[in-house]
Image: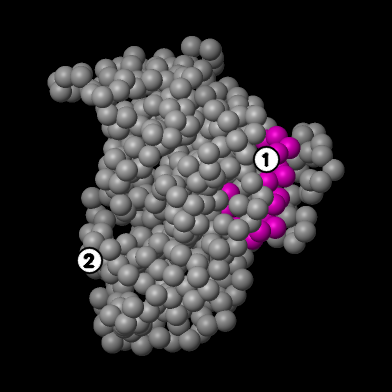
Amino acid sequence: MRRTTRSRTPYQDGYYQDSFLSSPAQQMYVPKKRRSPILPLVLVTLCLCVVGIGGFLLLGGQSSDSRPDDQGRQDPQNQQLLISDVVDPSSGSSSSGLFSNKLAGSTETVDENGIVHGTTPSGINYVVRGRGELAYQSDRVTLAAIGDQIVSEDCLNLASRNYQESGNGNGYDFAPWYQEIGPYCRQFDLRFVNPETVTCDPDVQTPTGWPSFISPDSAVDNLADQGFNIFNFASNHVYDWGTDAIERTHREEFSKYPQVTIVGSYLSEEDAQTVQMIERNGITFAFLAYTYADNTYYTDYHDMPNYYYDRPFDYETIQADVTRAREVADVVIVCMHWGTEYVSEPNAQQYQWAEYLADMDVDLVIGTHAHIMQPVKYVTGPETGNTIPVVFGLSDVVSGWTITDTILSAVFTCDFVPQADGTITVENLVWHPTIEWSDGGQVYVRFLSGMSEAEINANTRTPDVSDDYTYLSNMVYGLIQEIEVDW
């Protein structure tokens, strides 16, 4: 069943204790972007282009309200907008994607993978993946986000069993976990996940779980195969195996997937200051990511070797990064690795940073780390009065654990909708609760909305709960009260 809940004020629960915290906005508030002064000119140009090229941009008659499954998605090479009709690519100068023209006058090059590398007249470096690609729907760009993939010892044992059952010998297979949620997420344009840990070649090093996590390369390979195109790599486990493992993960694993945007961990400060963007329907989306701490440098992030291997919660760093992103991107999305582990209520640090990011005028905050569901709330910045949606915690989408709170998670979805007045609104925020499930056979992630009460209660992965349906219902609806819940 699909149920929409009414909003409540967090003061009812007594967890706004600090004096610097301001009251949340009303549920129906939809934050808007600043108006682009050149939008009318761009729209006129677009209209002329459409008239000139006839029905080419109709994508074979796809309706604006349809979401094709992965089988029906067109090859990106066949979805290119006619950027050449707006700007001559041979000139080496950009007039940006077709929405805000923020990149006007920039100098750009395109590498062998079709990725745009540019520098603005003011000296901001940026990368654009998907230049000219269309979204699944003509009137909006959609996002799906899932939480942490924690490759624990339990998870490794299950992945090894999956691989052996396939008859391939020894290895690790993570694909079965995603057999239900993978195809669903591929229906969205922007697909976010938190891989959490560095990786290794199992033939060279043995993967391990807690306390020093290192996942087999296949854990990331599967996420790329599933179609996720944004990886958050700012976490408290990035330094678990030192700087060599960080560099190896970037150079030997992430480099295999140039179309995936990696944020939160970089190989140099120059890379960290380069704004990473994805473009759909001419709208540019910048992604940034930060972590509250690292387990190796837990007491003081200033002891980290640098601020680029694992981007920390540093005010000057975040302010500079967001300012750069705001200058070149139409939408700025920030991932925060934060929260008190196994506690569903956000802590004071989370609210403080959420308010700071609202004052910085970001569009959406996605939270990871706590290993348990946390609420989605509209948070208002005390300095500017700007209000933004904050997903405080998505929990662990995959962990292999058998503690109910830690295997209950969600797919969070929303739409970014351009308006006639040049603003972009964040709309249709929905929480799709999921859980790692098994009837004694293969373990995989299932939507609660797709199961009967009997199926939910039959889950063998929840030995700590006797009445799963009632427990999960209380947990989900007790936390998610400001956006729609799909269950």
**Residue in view at x 70 percent, y 39 percent:** 349
Q: Position of residue 18 (x, y in %)?
A: 82, 39
Give whichever of discs 2 and 1 has the lower sequence position: 2
Amino acid marked by disc 2? Asn
**Residue in view at x 78 percent, y 55 percent:** 382
Q: Position of residue 441 (x, y in %)?
A: 30, 17
Q: Is label 2 in a helix, a strand or a loop?
A: helix
Q: Is residue 141 magenta?
A: no
437 sits left or right of 204 in the view = right
Q: Residue 350: which numbered mark, if any?
A: 1
Amino acid marked by disc 1? Gln
57 sits left or right of 21 in the view = left
Q: Position of residue 323 (x, y in %)?
A: 60, 62
Q: Is label 1 in a helix, a strand or a loop?
A: helix
Magenta segment: 346-369
Rounded to the nearest angstrom, the CA distance separating label 2 from label 1 is 43 Å
**Residue in view at x 38 percent, y 20 percent:** 208
Q: Is residue 365 magenta?
A: yes
Viewer-side residue, 485 vs 252: 252
Q: Residue furthest right?
A: 19
Is residue 435 visible from the viewing direction of this image? no
Mark closer to the observer (2, 1):
1
Q: Position of residue 468 (x, y in %)?
A: 52, 20
Viewer-side residue, 197 vs 433: 197
Q: Residue 78: which numbered mark, if any?
A: 2
Other residues around mark 2 within 10 Å, as few (<14) / some (14–19) / many (≥20): few
278 is higher (above) or lower (below) than 203? below
Q: Residue 67: which numbered mark, if any?
A: none
Viewer-side residue, 440 vs 80: 80
Is residue 248 visible from the viewing direction of this image? yes
Residue 117, located in which quarter of the rendered image?
bottom left
